[in-house]
Amino acid sequence: MKDTANTERNRLSKAWNGVVVGLERIGFSPLGFGLLLIIAILPLIPPFNQEHILRWLIMGAFFAAQAAAFDFTAGYINVVNFGFAAILGLGAYTSAILANKAPFLIVQPGISPWISIWIGALVAGLLGLLLGMLTLRLRGIFAAVMAWFVGIALMGLVRNLPDLTRGALGLHPPSLLETSSNLPYFYIILAMMVVTYIVLRMVTKSHLGLAFKAIGQNIDAARASGINPTKYRVLNFTLSCLFAGWLGGFNAHYLCSLTPQTLMHTSKTVEVLAIAYIGGRGSMWGGMVVAFPFVFFIEYLRSNLQELPGLHLVIYGVLMILVMIFYPDGVAGLYRWVVARVKSRFR
């Protein structure tokens, strides 16, 4: 009996180890995968099946995916892309214009949104390629400022081409689905979030990730060791912006309302930056974990403190200051510290 029990235990242990190894290959820990499953079933459980809470869950997944794409650049090659929201907006506007059928605009291609989203992603990726080349000779804050200038130029361009974008009046692209329910949109953006994370995580776990980290820590030392900063920085910007544009396309056809001020403003980048940094710079998963409770908290404040517009930006700033002072590695660093303490207790 004991031999049978030991054999069964060993079999289960091997099976579990196989599951853990498989999850780690795609960038998940068992705990992280468990959290993903919980988030996936939340819309099926009251009160999370209410439409306004489903909308919060969609925004949580949307910001989580953005945080991963943003941290791919800020956390690895040490360049803060302050034009991130504008590039996301470029993907959104490209997709919206290509899917447009409005008679009052000069361009009416009428392409399916399911196709135009991918074209928007490619256009944003091409801009990322250009942005990476523009910032080649710049470091730190100077590269960040250059990205910010590109974002401002993009927003100004969208605002001043009313025949194409309707400017400040806003563009109203067709929706992805013929439904008024938020539930299918939640599972679409959740799938996009998972794909964004897995692809970027697998890139960072490859030799490319080692090169990114070396460039982020010391670009001169990386160059001296034989790493070509030009190639790797351009590749990093291109991938990050491609996913930003992809997510922007979803946002365009989910909200069905685009204006440059509400989509491409620098404050939108600050929101993503805050989530990524509070989650833990360079972790990628930290910002994704933080995004959901953060969105719920901010949306609750917005709905209950409408007389204080902009309060959420103040909260972002305060939280970032507190995190940088007390937990500079963010939630991810705090998690690693707790795990290390627990393991040391049981040795």
Image (cartoon, rainbow, N blue to C red):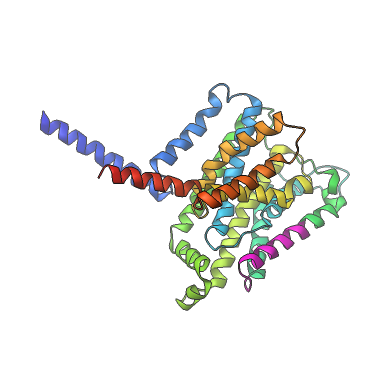
Q: Position of residue 22 (x, y in %)?
A: 36, 46
Residue 160 drawn in magenta:
no
Question: Quick check: 157 above or below 278?
Answer: below
Q: Position of residue 253 (x, y in %)?
A: 70, 40
Extent of the magenta region:
136-154
- Foreground residue, 120 or 150? 150
Q: Residue at x 44, y 76 (%)?
A: 225
Answer left or right for 316 relative to 17: right
Question: Quick check: 79 above or below 105?
Answer: below
> Image quarter for residue 310?
top right
Question: Quick check: 278 above or below 82?
Answer: above
Q: Residue at x 25, y 36 (%)?
A: 12
Q: Quadrant of the N terminus?
A: top left
Q: Main secondary structure of the magenta part?
A: helix
Specify whether residue 98 is in view: yes
- Foreground residue, 188 or 224? 224
Q: Position of residue 326 (x, y in %)?
A: 51, 49
> Image quarter for residue 256?
top right
> Image quarter for residue 180?
top right
